[in-house]
Image: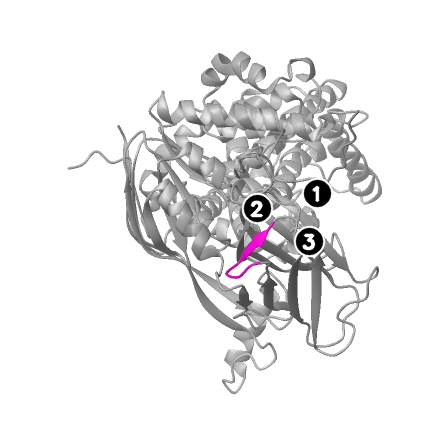
Amino acid sequence: MSEFAIKVEGLAKKYLLQHQASGRRYVALRDVLANKARALFGSGKPEAGSRRSTEEFWALKDVSFEIQPGEAIGFIGRNGAGKSTLLKLLSRITEPTSGRIRLRGRVASLLEVGTGFHPELTGRENIFLNGAILGMGRADIKRKFEEIVDFAEVEKFLDTPVKRYSSGMYMRLAFAVAAHLEPEILVVDEVLAVGDAQFQKKCMGKMQTASQDEGRTVLFVSHNMAAISELTRRCIFLENGKIKAEGATPAVVQQYLAIAAGTDGVYQSKSIQIPRVDRIEMITSQSSQVQISGEPLEIHFTIVHGAPRVGLCFSFQFVNQYGVAVAHCWIHDPEHPICRIGEKSVLKCVIPKLHLNVGTYYLRTYLAEPPGGQLFEMLDAPLLFEVSIVDRHTLFGWRPDVCTYLEDCDWQTS
Amino acid sequence: MRELTIEAGKTERHYWADLWRYRELFFFLSWRDVLVRYKQTVIGILWAVLRPLLTMIVFTVVFGKLAKMPSEGLPYAVFVYVAMLPWQFFSSSLAEASNSLIANANMISKIYFPRLVIPASAVIVCFVDFLISGVILAGLLAWYHVGLSWRIALLPGFTLLALAASFGISLWLAALNVKYRDFRYIIPFIVQFGVYVSPVGFSSATVREKGGDLAAHLYALNPMVGVINGFRWAFGSDAPWDSFGLLTSLGVTLLLLFSGIKYFRATEKAFADII
């Protein structure tokens, strides 16, 4: 028998999606009683009034893998690929529909740091409370207290209610408590998106020690490919609830980035939702999705909005291979009327001079109501493009990690 | 090293062991709720005392002075307050516990722990209030020169009965409230209605007098009837000891408690999905 830490066999999770005509989220007892009564006294016509249908949705289907003790493993995939569901199943928050998970050792999950923090309580009180929620005993917390406070750098504010903390302090404290858990299996979901660069580095260090020096098994989910590459050796790539690829991290990450985006410069939506981004066409300065830095870039977005609409906002970002958004462009209806006529509109965006450094970038789009309102559609990596630099006069050796942005500048020398 | 197997429909195998492992979480949650309850309030813990005290005064004036109802040989204020204590504990437990799962939804959808801990700690917080408002009772007893007898030794037993009844119903309501959000409208109704259905402001002997034995037996189906009669008896009321009524209340309480635990456990696995 092999020495696994986690063994997953044929795991599946089904959710029932309810489409209700009324759009209400919860079942009301009133409706249940009304339906029962109708079934009793009625002519057997089921639910004539409420057009409700239930649809099955398999968040995970037939997933199997094995993880060795002390291994750090990454889970990648687009939004909705089943990563979070998998972590929820592993940390026992929800129950699988079928399949089996075998765990050797205690699991602690950092699905979201700061869960259970109470704003009225002081830093000190929250350390104890949060520790207990994450499964630490009182003696453990006492023993680690100094260390946690040091890590979070909040000694001066220990007796202040956390509602008066800055958001940075709050997140530091929350992560500090979580980072000092000592489980055999640590499940981490996107915590590195918080805090300043220095603190992020500290967190990465902490997780690295956990897996390399302390021999803990670390499961790491992130959209940040840089963090995934740094922390893990092996990766599992999920798509539509199934394992698409599994293997050494660099290869799987490359595959993810390549599949995540089309390569022919055109994205065509398969969705039927309204409103949606139906088609994206990217006209790069060179063929096959290669753009020369400093040259114009043109992108056409076709928005299907059904009927004339007021107050639609569209924006897009360029995201680098580390998952960091490096540029943001937008068009908002009140400032610049869009989608006010007909059922379909084309938005043409011309970037006169693309200032990005060499590297692979992908697109991310947002179709929404004005800030604070509903997000209709977010497309992660519908298209991918490569930026390169062709300038025979330069002496500079271009590399992707030198910088992200190239500024125009005029020099005067004397 | 402990190996854990998670399979569909099999997660409850380690349930009671897990519950024991999470006892400190239970402690911390109760402590948090007690702490938070009285932070940023002007008179703090006095609220726990003020509510039953004011209600007692109103009931004493209305039932004792105006309606001149019998009070089983106790001063009317003591007679009402002794019933008010367990009743207030019961009603606030229902209100707090039924809402507790929803209030802690973010914890439930992010972290595993036996969900039973949450309504249990909500009930315990109300129990702390109950103990605090008990202090006023000592003052009342001294003021009215009511002596205590050996009967007081049974008081912990009746308190336990009140705890079991509150917890049992709370489990039902908490679990139902996750699924059917309109249950939160029922609870204030139960509480409001219950204070008149339970013998808080009057003696349960009145029911026997007006309705006969059958009515009294049916009346005892309300678990709080047994508890309140027990409390009054322990503080020296002259109403006769009613074994049948007590056993009925005890039976109903146990039924509620066990079915509550069973229903809660059957539904808690889906809480994270529907909350």
Disc 3 crowd, CA 10 A, few/some/many (<14, 14-19, 20+): few
**Outermost residue to the bottom:** A43
Identify residue for label 2.
Answer: A389
Q: Quadrant of the N terminus of chain A?
A: top left
Q: Nearer the viewer, residue A104 or B258?
A: A104
Identity of the amino acid at label 3? Answer: Phe
What mark, if any, has residue B189 been given in the picture?
3
> Which span of residues is magenta-colored?
A286-292
Which secondary structure, mark 1?
loop
The way the protein has been coloured in the rendering is one colour
Q: Nearer the viewer, residue B206 or B95?
A: B95
Of badges 1 and 2, nearer the viewer stands 2
State whether residue B95 appears in this view: yes
Identity of the amino acid at label 2? Answer: Ile
Relative side of B66 to B5, left or right: right
Identify residue for label 1.
Answer: B202
Identity of the amino acid at label 1? Answer: Phe
Q: Nearer the viewer, residue B3 or B11?
A: B3
How far apart are the alpha carbons under marks 1 and 3? 20 Å
> In the picture shown, does residue B241 fall above or below A365?
above
Which secondary structure, mark 3?
helix
